[in-house]
Image (tube, rainbow, N blue to C red):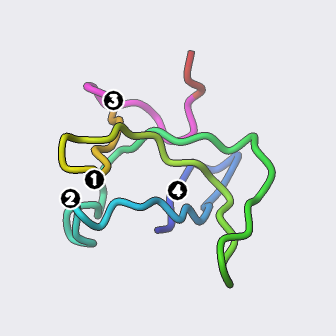
């Protein structure tokens, strides 16, 4: 998926394994938490430029870590 991290960082591709719990429509305009200060990772024929954060649910799917309030795109996590 393509994630917009704001003007300073821009858009990055993340190859998150989230299809068990989310459709493309579910993710449109949704805030997610991600890490961009890692080296790009080759996965098959694709390159992941960001790590999308989440947790494993009881069925082995991924549940996204999301902010509970709005924050500007690209805001640092602490």
Disc 3 crowd, CA 10 A, few/some/many (<14, 14-19, 20+): few
The answer for how far apart the CA atoms under marks 3 and 4 are is 15 Å
Q: Is residue 74 magenta?
A: yes
Label 1 with label 2: CB-CB less than 8 Å? yes
Q: Is residue 72 magenta?
A: yes
- The disc placed on residue 21 is 2
> Residue 66: x and y, percent?
33, 35
Q: Circle 3 is placed at which residue position?
A: 67
> Residue 35: x and y, percent?
61, 40
Give the extent of the magenta segment.
Answer: 67-75
User: In the structure shown, which secondary structural element does the residue marked by tag 4 occupy?
Assistant: strand
Residue positioned 27% across, 26% down in the render: 69
User: In the structure shown, which secondary structural element does the residue marked by tag 2 occupy?
Assistant: loop
Label 1 with label 4: CB-CB less than 8 Å? no
User: In the structure shown, which secondary structural element does the residue marked by tag 3 occupy?
Assistant: loop
* Outermost residue, bottom side: 45
> Residue 36: x and y, percent?
68, 44
The answer for how far apart the CA atoms under marks 1 and 2 are is 7 Å
Answer left or right for 39 relative to 54: right
Q: Circle 1 is placed at which residue position?
A: 61
């Amino acid at each position: 998926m393509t994630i917009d991290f704001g003007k300073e960082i821009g858009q990055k591709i993340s190859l998150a394994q989230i299809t068990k719990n989310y459709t493309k429509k579910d993710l449109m305009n949704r805030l997610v938490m991600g890490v961009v200060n890692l080296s790009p990772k080759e996965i098959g024929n694709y390159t992941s430029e960001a790590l999308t954060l989440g947790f494993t649910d009881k069925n082995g799917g991924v549940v996204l870590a999301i902010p509970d309030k709005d924050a500007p795109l690209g805001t640092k996590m602490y």
